[in-house]
Image (tube, rainbow, N blue to C red):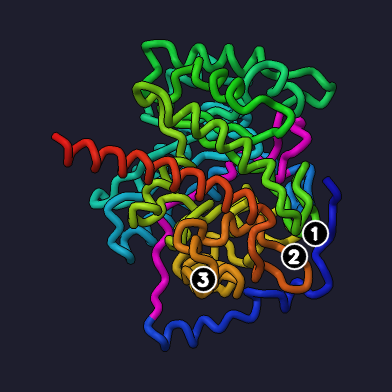
Amino acid sequence: MTMSAAPAGAATEWPADLDVQALLESGWRPTPFHQFVLKIHSRCNLACDYCYMYEMADQGWRRQPRRMTRATIDRVAGRIAEHARTNRLPRVEVILHGGEPLLAGPDRIRYAVETIRSTVDAETSVAFYLQTNGVLLDSMFLRLFDELNVHVSVSVDGDAEGHDRHRRRADGRGSHAQVTAGLRRLTAPAHRHLFSGLLCTVDLANDPVATYEALLAHRPPAIDFLLPHGNWDTPPPGRTPGSPDTPYGDWLAAVFDRWYGAPVQETRVRLFTEIIRLLLGRPSRSESIGLSPVVVTVVETNGGIEQIDTLKSAYEGATATSLHVSTDSFDSALLLPRIAARQIGHRALAAECRACPLRKVCGGGLYTHRYRSGSGFANASVYCPDLIRIITHIHRTVAEDLAALKHTSRES
């Protein structure tokens, strides 16, 4: 991927000029954050070539402290408690993230979980999750997570060949063997209750059904298939901006047919279940699709309050807000134009998206994938044809099943 500095017009690109005061006067109100992503360690022990943190536009990780200090954790805990109290939230989620969060070590992870849990008022429950590459996932960590009730998701890109093509160490060695060893420990009977799922980045070079079945071998409760991050300026592999071709939509459709056609549900694939929910008129629970307000914020290792970290793939400084947990509340972040833009539904869509019959389901796609220098995020997703392909495929398949079921019920 090509690295790029902040474009000259980034300060004025949409949504920098979004009038939040006018939104408030029109009756719009921000939705409180429910998820807090804590970057407890800013470095990683792998060098995945598609990583948005280290290999793409924003290189801010180089200026971050390696590990979140206890003092910063204390401030984060206070701000989460304040936000939950002010907005009367019955539940919040804290995701321990990185870099590779296990590099923070067991003592720092314990301190973060216990401090946040003890600081937040009893009226609010706090659920903890951790996303890891799995390489360091050993019995010591798993005993800690069992004690603290921390649920774990692991990144793995299918079988050994597909995984090791991208997810390697700095010296070029693949990580699949170590990741699968960590997964065996996590999925053993003593710790399987901590397993929240797998994350897999789509690679067009990998067979879609073979990739799905390799993931399924771990018996995950859920799988997230992630599109490689890119945009109109820096397109993802195999995606020509503006082309009607649908390589990613075709790949996902093949996985959907294998998943949907199974005699019994083998796992939950979040993208597919969210599309089905949206087609049935339910709200989205994912930022990657639909028009529901995005309720996630990130706290960097140094305590900076930032937007969702995948935006680092767009340009240098794309996630920055200038807010910090030592001086600013999470409520103040909700009124920033760049964060408000993620909560105003169809009003954040490009004109072509607002005119699209799939807008309520697609929602413009993942915000990160809409960026184009000059117009900012006021664009359709660079994956637009692929999203149309998978949504219409799922709609047709489910509609045919519902029609057949209706016909059968009439005959009986």
In which quadrant will I find the N terminus? top right
Q: Is residue 161 left or right of residue 186?
A: right
Residue at 80% in and 59% down: 233
Label 1: how many Cα within 10 Å (few below 14, some 14–19, many 20+)? some
Q: Which mark is residue 340?
A: 3
Q: CA distance from mark 2 to mark 3?
A: 19 Å
Name the mark on residue 97.
none
* Distance from Cα at disc 1 to Cα at disc 2: 6 Å
Residue under label 1: 233
Q: Is residue 394 magenta?
A: no
Q: Is 71 placed left or right of 270 in the picture?
A: right
Q: Are marks 1 and 2 in contact (CB under 8 Å)?
A: yes
Q: Earlier in the sequence, mark 1 or mark 2?
A: 1
Residue 26 can be seen, yes or no: yes
N-terminal-most mark, 1 or 3: 1
Give the amino acid type for the residue marked by disc 1 in the picture.
Answer: Asp
Where is residue 65 drawn, in percent x and y?
70, 45
At horizontal 49% and vertical 12% (from top left) the residue drawn is: 185
Which residues make up the magenta segment? 28-53
**Residue at which label 2 appears:** 372
Q: Mark 2 or mark 3: which is in front?
A: 2
Secondary structure, mark 1, is loop
Helix, strand or loop under label 2:
loop
